[in-house]
Image (cartoon, rainbow, N blue to C red):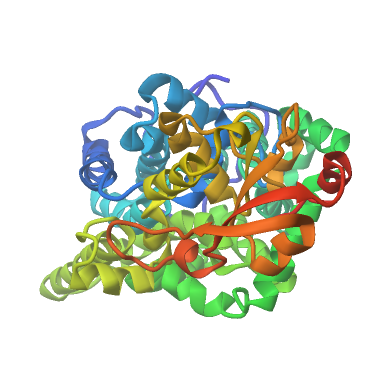
Amino acid sequence: MSIGMPQSDLRTAPLPSGTRITSRDSFWRLDVAPLFAIALSTLLLHFLTGNRYGFNRDELSLLDDARQLSWGYVAYPPITPLFARLSLLLFGTSLPGFRFFSWLVQAIAVVLTGLMARELGGSRRAEIFAALAAVPFCLGGGALMTYISFDYLCWVLAAYFVIRLLRTGDARWWLAIGVALGLGMLCKYTMGFFTLGIVGAVLLTDARRFLRSKWLWLGVAISILLFLPNLLWQAQHHFVSLDFLRFIHERDVREGQTSGFFPDQAELALLAFPLALAGLHYFFSKNGRPFRMLAWMYVIPLALFLIARGRGYYLAPAYPMLYAAGAVFLDDWFADLQASRARVLRIVVFSALLIDVAIAIAFALPTAPVGSPWWYFASKVNGTLREEIGWPEFAETVAKIRDTLPAKDRPRLGILAGNYGEVGALNLYGERFGLPRAISGVNSFWERGYGDPPPETVVVVGFPREWVDSQFTSCQLAGHPWNRYGTANEETIENPDMFVCRGLRQPWPAFWRNFQSFR
């Protein structure tokens, strides 16, 4: 596909008078320099703070999966483990290196948000407002190496390509849209909701004319072909991810994590929420009619997530396109006001967006020293910070338990972990202590089995006393997790006992067959 080439056989209808759409065929212009400056600033913030604590439990699981590449995993599709593997190859187990690609794709999403405002006809000021509105999620959602970052970028890419499609009328942009959707399905399955949003948007707007275009159907074919390897993997594994997603959804509903869907939307956008509302209004307005498709691309996933009782943050990637439109709408509105009043309102908007950035820095990034008053406050607001503490000590404690065992028990020693953070930490930090690779029944770790020959003496972590006594003939309490900061987190609160167990009550194959679990 060649960008900027002559238009295809399907073009948009003439835009109504009053619509500010300008022709900007040269991408590399000085007026996008501020967008790259903002994006580079987010990278700098991540580099300055990203090595403060340690790996998060989600990252430890991802790191272990990255060492065993596959077309699918129980908890997520393959794109994020692929980039995690690339991080390991380039940077080793460096914490900033492992997170680099997450930071990078979020910075790209910030630039694209500003470029969407540009494509909608916005001024440089509108581009900057839109990009600044996207920064808080870039800092918070991109702080860790998880699938959230890559999923977010694919949504933003798809929205940007749709805007290019509608602005230029070049139906070949459906090829790029298909690539974004296909890659998005390889990042996180919630991309399916956005895909349904695009389908509905086509049917509900003038974009129906593209249904006669071969390029749209080629884009559909591309998205299916990209997703096909993971779909085949799911079929070969009895669609295990559906069981996982069902379990996670039932847990979230049971724990009330889906009950605040609408309030969560305001929390996602913070002080930029009015900007998002302005963007939605713009897409439904007369001037925004050529881009009406994007309004439905937000409303339909919103409705679907609400009906399905999804978590609030699932809709986060839909906001950049609203920020872009809202920035254009406000900039046009300010232009019609008295100069002094417009100047004051611009300062108010700019200040609000900077406050949002400051909030993200304070609560989403590991900025405060562990144990400081601000640390305790920030970790109450953002519980993921606590889960970045204590993993090296966790592995060290298991190694000390191993060292207390008689020499005859060590050749057939196994380590059985209850959750993915524990098994990931033991497999990362345990190497320096000569520990055997940990085993677990959780998520994709179950597929990797229990080793050959199977263990005879087992250090068991992350399980309650009642469970270990029901599975082994002999279990002795051997230790507890700790961390050098004395911080209470999941490891020190939930099932904190560590046991040395012997005599599995059933053969390992029978035990393992029923040991699979999700978390």
Q: Quadrant of the C terminus?
A: bottom right
Name the residue rendered at 75%, 37% in the picture. Answer: 447
Query: 299 and 336: which one is in front?
Result: 299
The image position of residue 96, as x and y in percent, is 32, 37
Relative placement, left or right, of 110 versus 442 is left
Residue 214 seen in this snapshot: no
Is residue 472 placed above or below 212 in the rendered structure?
below
Q: Residue at x 39, y 20 (%)?
A: 90
For the N terminus, give its image quadrant.
Answer: top right
**Is residue 45 depicted above or below 365 in this figure?**
above
Q: Residue furthest left?
A: 340
The percent coordinates of residue 288 (x first, y second) are: 50, 59
- Give the quadrant of residue 453: top right
Q: Nearer the viewer, residue 492 or 205?
A: 492
Up/down of 317 relative to 111, above or below: below
Question: Residue 361, percent across and down?
Answer: 25, 59
Residue 129 picture quarter: bottom left
- Along the horizontal axis of the image, is 478 left or right of 200? left
| Residue 285 percent across, percent down from the top left | 51, 67
Nearest the eye: 287 or 330: 330
Horizontal arrangement in the rendering, residue 188 relative to residue 38 (left or right): right
Please say whether residue 88 is visible from this viewpoint: yes
Residue beneath the point at 50% across and 30% down: 83
- Camera-side residue of 507 and 343: 507
Q: Residue drawn 56% across and 53% down? A: 290
